[in-house]
Amino acid sequence: MKLAGALLIISASTAAGWLYGSMLRKRRKNLADLRRLLQWLETEIGYNLIPLREAFFRISQRLQGEVSLLATVFIRYLDDPGGLTAGEAWQKTIQNCREKLVLAGPDWMILEDLGCNLGTTDREHQLKAVREGIERIKIQETAVEEQAVKNEKLYRYLGMAAGTLAVLLFY
């Protein structure tokens, strides 16, 4: 019985370490997808000259994974009969998607800042805001990449070591 408990404790802590490491990988992927979303938005606004709703519809067709949820939820809020502005729809989209995407506080701030300019300014100002968002996400991507390289294995080993230590202390 003690052996089963010890194995359960070690397994649970190891799984927690792996989970935290996988969250770093998932955040990296989400940031890359966000960058791609903003790059496509820049193209749609800058070169195709189409409205935001149509731009996000096209982007939602191209994106895969969790970040595509941002585009589809944004479209839903824009289509809402309540008559939300693009900025309001974007803020509601961010609130709705916070629990579904693995992003940190600074990542969400980038998206919130972008929403202040969506649909409220002229095309050039929106393009400038989108480009700034792309650059800020690139910076976040680099930081997360460095953090993942340093810490991903550490979290895995730390989870297993913590479980082993707990077993040794309690048994």
Image (cartoon, rainbow, N blue to C red):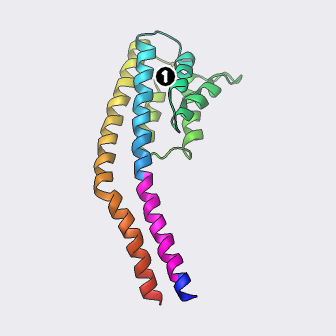
Q: In this view, which residue lies farthest toward the right?
A: 81
Q: Residue at x 41, y 72 (%)?
A: 160
Front residue of 94 and 66: 66
- Residue 104 in sight: no
User: Quick one: quadrant of the N terminus?
Assistant: bottom right
Image position of 17 with respect to 129: above or below = below
For disc 1, the marked residue is: 118
Q: Is residue 151 above or below residue 13?
A: above
Q: x, y (%) of residue 78? A: 62, 23
Q: Say which amino acid is labelled 1.
A: Leu
Q: Is residue 155 shown left or right of residue 100?
A: left
Range of magenta residues: 6-23
Q: Secondary structure at mark 1?
A: loop
Q: Quadrant of residue 34?
A: top left
Q: Position of residue 136 (x, y in %)?
A: 33, 34
* In front of the other: 143 or 91: 143
List x then y, in percent, for residue 81.
Answer: 71, 22
User: What's the magenta bit mostly, secondary-structure-wise?
Assistant: helix
- Quick check: is 11 in the magenta stretch? yes
Does residue 7 appear in the picture of this structure? Answer: yes
